[in-house]
Amino acid sequence: MNDLSPFAAPHVRPLDPAKFRDPLITAGGEVRAEVAMTRLDTLWINTGTLCNLACRTCYIESSPRNDALVYISLAEAEAYLDEALTLGTREIGFTGGEPFMNPDMLAMLDAALARGFEVLVLTNAMRPMQRFEAQLLALKSDRLTLRVSLDHYSQPIHEAERGLGTWDKAIAGTKWLSDHGFRLAIAGRQLPGETLEDARAGYAALFEAEGLNVDSADPAALVLFPEMDATADVPEITEACWGILGKSPDSIMCASSRMVVKRKGEPRPVVAACTLIPYDPEFTMGETLAEASRPVRLNHPHCARFCVLGGASCSA
């Protein structure tokens, strides 16, 4: 079966070893593009890489055993929430792993909402989330969105990625969120050879059949990630590419977001450039949000695959 994941594994590098070596200059001798931060619109907090699933091609390699990113604590998260308040940040995103594996997840969610942020939680809606149904109902808010990962609108393709028996459990959790009036979004994938229109139509049929209150035509409610082939070579992004592609660096994810991670064995959390590159020390921007506001040099294949050429973003 073809690799259906929208992400590449975090340690995969390009086929051409000459590429993505020098942070300033490309293999062709051109000035590498960089992205300046225009604002911190979204602050992501990685709750840890532990997950109840071991998906076949998880971009961050989450699993029941991978604790490369350890659980961040409430106190550590609150320090970043307070700093984000001073910077005018609009949205806090929680991702993992599975966020509801973290024992402080509900408290961190409450802390973010209490500070007035819009909050987005990425979840598989399975048992780790479902055990907190009563607490979630108490936190339900127009500022809280739960985005559930459904890898496809068909059970076989979803389970090829996430494992046998995962479909019914994910659908049950998703239906519970919808039935109880939560703001609900779905993260899915547009498969190779599938048009965007066909993908949205497939999800629309699923939403109608299951009674899910999700607008398949709304790109913030149904987020479809582009095809990502980890084995395919990708071009390096130069300063000239902005004009050639007709793109603004302000449209790239790292112009308006950062992610807090706590790496195993390190004494405190740090701020990474984006959600896709949590392990690479070159993309560690600092320990505080202020330090992390410096420009990001696009010296990683994900910068081309996902953001510049893929046109995708983890936030809505």
Image (tube, rainbow, N blue to C red):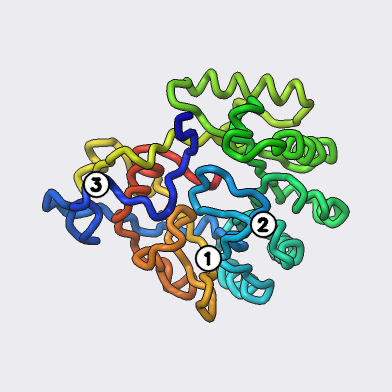
Residue positioned 33% across, 44% down in the render: 304
Residue 15: x, y in percent? Answer: 26, 45
Residue 99 numbered mark, or none: 2
Mark 2, Cα crowd under 10 Å, few <14 / some 14-19 / many 20+, is many
Q: Are marks 3 and 2 in contact (CB under 8 Å)?
A: no
Question: Which residue has dot 3 on it?
Answer: 236
- Element marked by disc 1: loop
Question: Which kind of residue does numbered mark 2 sit on?
Answer: Pro
Residue on which disc 1 sits: 68
Circle 1 or circle 3, nearest the eye? 1
* 234 sits to left or right of 180: left
Q: Is residue 264 left or right of residue 241?
A: right
Rendered position, 291 above or below 4: below
Secondary element under disc 2, as helix, strand or loop, is helix
Which residue occupies the extreme left position in the image? Answer: 29
Looking at the picture, tell me which residue is in the foreground, 40 or 234: 234
